Image (tube, rainbow, N blue to C red):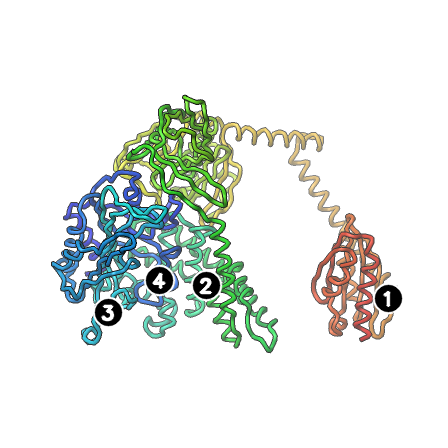
């Protein structure tokens, strides 16, 4: 079977077992503070396991694109060096939500592997949880017995808590798991060493291919376990490993999943894959990392310097570095591999094809930038090496870390270049610096979260904010305390809520909870969307958490946000009309004060285009289009309506369609009843946000009016100052006159400086073979520099010290001829020492340096001290 057939066989098999086949969720996770990336197939079903929402289907299956490069699941350093670790990978999985359990999960796994995929039984091993007496969890006899019906006892192994007890995180659903391993070794090797002894021992050819997780417990904040009300099955099978097993290969990279990319890289580098171990590793790293980068960009995550964007940038730079070091790529090359990836995977994942142009553009810009960084880093490293004492050729950990942290220069490249010059790197010191940074980061982000306290059992919190800004009779369903940086706040979940949680770029509502019986008000300072929960943030709990409350939203703030959110829809539609249908939203921020909108476009938007967008949005406002919404629309109905669907978003079975005139989008956010509520729309700025991404900031309503008023006031003030209503013409005339005056002043200054140089040469005093000059020059700093360097050009053996005061601040200048520098004089060292007398400091080059200070009274003493230092060196 080829890889596409292997994937389809899995999906068809579970469809036959009454599983609903669902699409992969985006690889980028939103509205979950515990995750940046989807790192397992179960992530999109997390709310079901947590009890935050009911399951739409009791049985589902899919192939999920995953990324593991940070946190507990970090495979980055192994990628490319071994045969089976990856950053981006596919996870085939089947799930049961309170339906079937261990018996069916094991039976179907066996049937698929041995009957559909025809894997040899004697190469399969199963592991079961050995139990944990400390936690009161017994040996998983049930799973063992089901395996014993299919495998001999020698192929059923007991696993410890690390290998055979799966946990979602520090808290939450968990349970024993049963792994399925496969022995890929040749028969001769298998005869020598029993495969059972190599299971879970990191042997590259005795590998885990499938993990069957049986969720039956909940881990509480205090570490204890309690049974879940409903038991679930969560399985995950590594697609790339499965292809290796079925296709009879010894490496994932030898399968048709990776070979097209590897052969393309080899062709571009003019090498043969398999001919050089180091080059092979580089090619595997590049092929793997390209997939992670391309899928991340397609899902809306661009490389950046923060959070998920930083991880993607780090992966991309790692790939560039391998290509640069081992394959000789000095120009952008990863972007040229995108068409091969799209051809290979675009059928299963259409987002790659749809976003191909953007992916190529972003990768090109990132590569181009980092290749320049590499060149800069190499120059800096050479400078560090040159300064090392001859008897101690070791680069300090601090210097290596500065290169890594500040300039993005990889530590392994620092080691490689250093070793080529016979220099060592203090890796232990580097690791200490790195660990110190990690500790600072951990301490800054450390959060303690208590268990939820359940007040009222409800299946889900219902949002009523589309129709209500105030809602009576709400109850607290659960709450918990969260402590960060020594300060505590509370998270409250209500059974019904009018508060909108921060989602889709729109900031969350604020307001208060009113206890009608006592009049107590509990301020809601923010509302967040966490997984599928609407979480209300308060600084304190109500006195009576079991009371009935009136939930009251700050309507003025909400309506301002809603107006700006509606404006993003109207602007999105207008941008596509003016610039083209390639424009697609790539991020947004909607606040009560302004909106920010990122979109795909490959050049600066012209002033004329911006003006046309502004006109079209304001025309839509004047048309006063009424909000048309369908809150319970199927995806098929939404497509028929022409709704915009954004790649990187996970849509459910039912979607909400928001329509204003010709603008039709899928959106769960808050909007105004009609476009006329926006009043006025003005674009504040347009700029680049990232490669291939532009950013517009705009305002509506009162903020737009204030912008117009400020501009009008400015024009009126200019008319008064310029004494004309022809402001532009007057300013141009003034600028032309100013430019002409500037030319004349430059000529006058040059003439004066020339005269001054001649005069200063007459003040020179002999000191052996040298001429010394020391004078006050109370000129503008540029003139002092011009005179100093002009004097240096006119005199061969000289040293000069000048003191000046400009704007009330003293400046000391030292200028030396090349012959003086050859004598051991250093202008930078001289000014640093003498500047102490003006309470300042400075520096510069050996032949010219300046220092500023605070004490003008000390300038004469500083000049004298500088002159003494020069004389002392010359006399020595």
**Side of 155 relative to 390 (left or right):** left
- C-alpha gap between disc 3 and disc 2: 47 Å
Q: Quadrant of residue 505?
A: top left
- Front-most of residues 765 and 473: 473
- Decide: marks 3, 1 in contact (CB < 8 A)? no
The residue at the point 81 percent across, 57 percent down is 803
- According to the picture, the residue beneath numbered tag 1 turns out to be 764
Closer to the eye: label 4 or 2: 4
- C-alpha gap between disc 1 and disc 4: 69 Å
- According to the picture, the residue beneath numbered tag 4 turns out to be 287
Going from N to C along the chain, the mark reached first, 3 or 4, is 3
- C-alpha gap between disc 3 and disc 4: 33 Å
Picture quarter with the C terminus:
bottom right
Q: Secondary structure at mark 2?
A: loop
How many numbered marks, from 0 up? 4
* Coordinates of residue 632 in the picture (x, y in percent): 28, 32
- According to the picture, the residue beneath numbered tag 2 turns out to be 331
Closer to the eye: label 1 or 2: 1
- Front-most of residues 209 and 386: 209
Tell me: residue 689, above or below residue 158.
above
Q: Name the mark on residue 197.
A: 3
Going from N to C along the chain, the mark reached first, 1 or 2, is 2
Q: Secondary structure at mark 1?
A: loop
Going from N to C along the chain, the mark reached first, 4 or 2, is 4
- C-alpha gap between disc 1 and disc 2: 55 Å
For label 1, count other residues whose C-alpha is less than 10 Å away and answer few (under 14), some (14-19) or many (20+): some
Closer to the eye: label 3 or 1: 3
Going from N to C along the chain, the mark reached first, 3 or 1, is 3
Tell me: residue 808, above or below residue 371.
above
């Amino acid at each position: 079977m080829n890889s596409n057939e292997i994937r389809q066989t899995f999906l068809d098999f579970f469809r036959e077992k009454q599983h609903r086949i669902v699409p992969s969720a985006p690889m980028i996770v939103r509205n979950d503070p515990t995750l940046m990336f989807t790192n397992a197939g179960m992530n999109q079903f997390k709310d079901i396991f947590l009890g935050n929402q009911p399951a739409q289907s009791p049985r589902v299956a899919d192939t999920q694109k995953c990324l593991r490069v940070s946190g507990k699941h970090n495979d980055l350093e192994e990628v490319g060096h071994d045969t089976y670790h990856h950053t981006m990978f596919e996870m085939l999985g089947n799930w049961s939500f309170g339906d079937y359990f261990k018996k069916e999960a094991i039976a179907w796994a066996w049937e698929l592997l041995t009957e559909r995929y025809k894997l040899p039984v004697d190469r399969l091993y199963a592991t079961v949880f050995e139990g944990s007496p400390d936690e009161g969890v017994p040996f998983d006899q049930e799973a063992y017995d089901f395996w014993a019906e299919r495998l001999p006892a020698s192929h059923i192994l007991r696993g410890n808590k690390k290998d055979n007890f799966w946990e979602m995180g520090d808290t939450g659903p968990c349970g024993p798991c049963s792994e399925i391993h496969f022995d890929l070794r040749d028969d001769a090797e298998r005869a020598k060493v029993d495969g059972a002894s190599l299971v879970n021992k990191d042997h590259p050819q005795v590998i885990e291919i499938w993990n069957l997780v049986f969720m039956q417990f909940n881990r509480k904040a205090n570490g204890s376990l309690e049974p879940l009300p409903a038991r679930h099955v969560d399985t995950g099978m590594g697609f790339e490993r499965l292809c290796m097993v079925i296709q009879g290969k010894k490496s994932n990279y030898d399968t048709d999943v990776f070979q097209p990319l590897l052969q393309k890289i080899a062709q571009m580098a003019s090498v043969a894959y398999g001919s050089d171990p180091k080059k092979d590793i580089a090619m595997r790293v590049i092929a793997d990392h390209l997939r992670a980068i391309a899928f991340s960009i397609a899902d809306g995550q661009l490389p950046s310097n923060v959070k998920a964007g930083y991880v993607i940038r780090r992966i991309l730079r790692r790939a560039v570095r391998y290509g640069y070091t081992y394959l000789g790529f000095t120009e952008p090359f990863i972007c040229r591999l995108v068409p091969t990836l799209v051809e290979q995977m675009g059928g299963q994942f259409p987002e790659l094809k749809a976003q191909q142009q953007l992916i190529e553009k972003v990768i090109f810009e990132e590569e181009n930038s980092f290749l320049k960084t590499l060149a800069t880093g190499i120059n800096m490293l050479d400078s560090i090496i040159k300064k090392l004492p001859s008897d101690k050729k070791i680069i300090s950990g601090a210097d290596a870390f500065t290169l890594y942290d500040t300039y993005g220069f990889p530590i392994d490249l620092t080691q490689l270049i250093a070793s080529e010059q016979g220099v060592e790197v203090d890796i232990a010191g580097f690791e200490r610096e790195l660990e110190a940074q990690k500790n600072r980061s951990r301490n800054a982000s450390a959060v303690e979260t208590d268990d939820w306290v359940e007040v009222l059992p409800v299946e889900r919190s219902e949002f009523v904010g589309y129709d209500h800004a105030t809602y009576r009779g709400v109850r607290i369903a659960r709450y918990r305390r969260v402590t960060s940086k020594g300060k505590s706040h509370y998270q409250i979940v209500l059974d019904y809520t009018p508060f909108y949680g921060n989602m889709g770029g729109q900031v969350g509502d604020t307001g208060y909870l009113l206890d009608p019986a006592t009049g107590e008000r509990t301020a809601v300072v923010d509302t967040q969307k966490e997984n599928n929960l609407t979480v209300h943030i308060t600084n304190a709990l109500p006195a009576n958490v079991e009371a009935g409350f009136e939930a009251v939203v700050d309507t003025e703030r909400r309506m301002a946000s809603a107006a700006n959110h509606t404006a993003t829809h109207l602007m999105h539609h207008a941008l596509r009309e003016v610039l083209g249908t390639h424009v697609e939203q790539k991020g947004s921020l909607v606040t009560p004060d302004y909106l920010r909108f990122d979109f795909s476009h490959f050049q600066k938007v012209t002033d004329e285009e911006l003006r046309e967008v502004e006109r079209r949005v304001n025309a839509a406002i004047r048309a006063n289009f009424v909000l048309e919404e369908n809150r319970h629309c199927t995806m098929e109905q939404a497509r028929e309506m022409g709704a915009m669907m954004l790649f990187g978003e996970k849509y459910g079975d039912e979607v909400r369609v928001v329509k204003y005139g010709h603008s039709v989008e899928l959106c769960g956010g808050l909007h105004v009843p009609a476009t006329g509520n926006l009043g006025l729309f003005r674009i504040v700025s347009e700029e680049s946000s990232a490669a291939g991404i532009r950013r517009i900031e705009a305002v509506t309503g009162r903020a737009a009016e204030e912008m117009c008023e400020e501009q009008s006031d400015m024009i009126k003030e200019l008319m008064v100052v310029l004494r004309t209503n022809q402001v532009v013409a007057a300013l141009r005339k003034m600028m032309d006159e100013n430019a002409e005056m500037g030319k004349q002043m430059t000529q006058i200054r040059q003439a004066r400086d020339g005269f001054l140089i001649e005069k200063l040469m007459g003040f020179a005093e002999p000191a052996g073979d040298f001429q010394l000059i020391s004078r006050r020059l109370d000129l503008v700093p540029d003139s002092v520099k011009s005179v100093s360097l002009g004097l240096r050009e006119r005199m061969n053996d000289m040293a000069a010290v000048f003191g000046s005061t400009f704007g009330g601040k003293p400046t000391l200048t030292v200028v030396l001829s090349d012959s003086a520098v050859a004598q051991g004089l250093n202008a930078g060292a001289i000014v640093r020492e003498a500047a102490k007398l003006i309470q300042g400091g400075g520096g510069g080059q050996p032949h010219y340096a300046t220092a500023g200070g605070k004490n003008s009274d000390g300038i004469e003493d500083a000049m004298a001290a500088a002159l003494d230092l020069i004389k002392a060196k010359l006399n020595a």
